[in-house]
Every structure is written in C-alpha cells, then in structure tokens.
Image: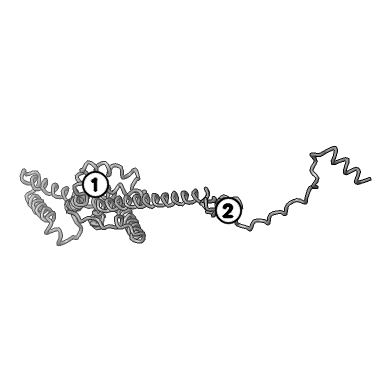
C-alpha cells in the first residue's frame, strides 16, 4: 500500500526531488578576542596565479594604515619644526630685550634715593634763623645810621655799629661753624641743588641715547607693574629723549627710581626665562636656538 502511494507520488510529480532536507551546517568557531575577522579576511585576500599557486596581497586596511602612519610622522615633523621656530623666535626676542635693558644693572640706588636730602622742616628752621639774622643786622644798621644823624647818642650809635659788624661776621660760614653745626638756609639750598644735579646726571647716563624707560616697557609681560598709569609720563618723556632734563623735583627722581627697580625685577625674570629656554634647546638638540648671541660691535 505504502509502496503504491510513493509510486503514485513519483509519477504525478516527476520534478519533485527525491532527497530529503539534510541537517544544517556546523557553526563556525568563535573568533579569538582582540582580532577582527573581517579585517583578517580583507587583509588576506589571495589571488591565484596561472600556475595555480596562491599569492597573498595586502588589503585596503594595510594601505590605509601605512598612509595614516606616514601622515602622523609628517604631522609630528611639522609640529616639531613649528615648535623649534617658536622657540627660536622667543629666544631672539628675550635676547634683544635683555640687551636693550641691561643698563638697569648700572643703577646707583644711593644716588637716586637722595638719602641726604634736606627735609622741609630743616629748611623752614634754617629760613627762620636766616630771617632773624637779617632782622638783627638791619636793626643794628638803623641804630648806627640814627647816631650819625644825631637822633641817638654817639655811644649808642657806636654800639649799634659794633653789633652790626658782629652780626655780619656770625653770618659768614667759617665763623658760623665755630659756634653751631646746623647748616644755614643757603647750605641746604646748595645741597639740594647738588643732589638734584647728581641725580639728573645719573639718570641721563642710564637713559643713554635710546631711552631706558621706553625700552624697558617691553618687559611688562614679566612685571605688570610697568604698565601702571603713574609711569605714563616717564614713558612719554623717555620716548622723546628728554627725561633727564625734566627731572626737577625730588618726587620725579623717586618715581624714576621706583620704575627702574621694577624694571630690574622684570629683567631678572626675563633673564631666568632666557636661561631656561637655552637649557631646553640644548636638551632637545636645537643648535640654532641654543647658539650664543653675537658680540656687540
């Protein structure tokens, strides 16, 4: 009966396959960790030569990796070149800055500090003594002249003449030093003028032909105090090369001294930065950056 049914099925459907569906194929083994199967398959593409031998050729990923490594090396070389150029420019700038502002090291603090400057109280006391001396000499002269006209007795006039002579002698510097050590008003004025003249000469020596204050203003990045507005007038006068002749008061000299002290701090910091850049250039083998500056002519 069953044989008849199968015979009938074969006769009715001659195109139907006689084989039954088999079991599914074995699953592929899992790929090892850290390895891309698709990358391995693409990178190990093979072609068959005419002799039938299998020759492996590099895939797209190998070519891309080689190109990427070349670009990385090129970018690295470009970054090193840029870094070297910036370092060389920085060292050149610091070297020029130090050369232009090295006159701050010639500062004479005692000369610009004006330690022996007569204060206003001493000057007022000396002026009062001077006025008293002048009044006494004038009174003695009036008494003497009054005796010559017969207004006062002759002996009073003679006493007035003697007092006038003594007062005049007491006003002479050589005689005055015998009975007092306090300087006169004229001595204080002369001392002030001498101190101001010496300070002005020293400022002129520091400023030179180019203007030290104007050149040291470039070191403001190492000391922001140099940008203060109170130094703006000094900067303008130094730029016009007329700073020394405008130093007429003690306050001007003190302000100049403060600026030079701040510039000296900035110079020290700039010098330290230059030495650090020089040592870094030596460590990296940059001979052009670490080269010593040429000597001045």
Seen as rendered, the residue at the extreme top is 12
N-terminal-most mark, 2 or 1: 2
Q: In the drawing, does residue 200 fall left or right of residue 11?
A: left
Where is residue 187 drawn, in percent x and y?
Answer: 17, 53
Mark 1 neighbour class, 10 Å CA radius: few under 14, some 14 to 19, many 20 or more = few
Q: Residue at x 63, y 58 (%)?
A: 32
Between residues 48 and 182, which one lies in front from this camera angle?
48
Q: Kindly identify which residue carries mark 1.
A: 249
Where is residue 73 drawn, in percent x and y?
Answer: 42, 52
Quarter occupied by residue 107? bottom left
Between residues 52 and 230, which one lies in front from this camera angle?
52
Between residues 276 and 112, which one lies in front from this camera angle?
276
Q: Comparing marks 2 and 1, which lies closer to the viewer?
A: 2
Between residues 49 and 177, which one lies in front from this camera angle?
49
Q: Kindly identify which residue carries mark 2.
A: 40
Q: Residue at x 24, y 46 (%)?
A: 249
Which label was assigned to residue 157? none
Viewport quadrant of the N terminus: top right
Q: In the drawing, does residue 74 fall left or right of residue 96?
A: right
- The answer to whether one can see residue 132 in this image is no
Q: CA distance from mark 2 to mark 1?
A: 87 Å
Seen as rendered, the residue at the extreme left is 148
Vertical relation: 156 (above or below) 236: below
Mark 2 neighbour class, 10 Å CA radius: few under 14, some 14 to 19, many 20 or more = few
Where is residue 91 drawn, in percent x and y?
Answer: 31, 53
């Amino acid at each position: 009966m069953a044989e008849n049914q199968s015979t009938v099925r074969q006769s009715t459907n001659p195109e139907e396959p006689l084989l039954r569906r088999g079991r599914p194929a074995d699953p592929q083994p899992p790929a090892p960790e850290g390895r891309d199967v698709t990358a391995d398959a693409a990178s190990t593409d093979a072609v068959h030569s005419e002799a039938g031998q299998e020759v492996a050729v590099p895939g797209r990923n190998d070519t891309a990796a080689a190109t990427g490594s070349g670009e990385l090396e090129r970018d690295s070389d470009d970054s090193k070149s840029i870094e070297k150029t910036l370092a060389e420019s920085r060292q050149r700038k610091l070297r020029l800055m130090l050369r232009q502002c090295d006159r701050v090291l010639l500062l004479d603090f005692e000369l610009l500090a004006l330690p022996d400057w007569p204060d206003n109280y001493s000057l007022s006391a000396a002026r009062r003594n001077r006025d008293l001396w002048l009044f006494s000499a004038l009174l003695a002269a009036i008494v003497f002249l009054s005796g010559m006209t017969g207004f006062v007795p002759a002996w009073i006039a003679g006493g007035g003449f003697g007092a006038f002579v003594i007062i005049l002698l007491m006003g002479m510097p050589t005689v005055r030093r015998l009975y007092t050590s306090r300087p006169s008003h004229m001595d204080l004025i002369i001392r002030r003028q001498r101190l101001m003249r010496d300070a002005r000469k020293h400022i002129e020596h520091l400023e030179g032909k180019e203007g030290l204050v104007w050149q040291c203003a470039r070191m403001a990045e190492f000391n922001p105090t140099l940008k203060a507005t109170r130094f703006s007038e000094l900067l303008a006068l130094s730029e016009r090369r007329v700073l020394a002749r405008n130093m007429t008061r003690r306050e001007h000299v003190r302000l100049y001294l403060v600026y030079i002290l701040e510039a000296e701090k900035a110079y020290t910091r700039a010098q330290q930065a230059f030495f650090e850049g020089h040592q870094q250039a030596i460590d990296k083998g940059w001979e052009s950056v670490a080269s010593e500056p040429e000597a001045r002519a």
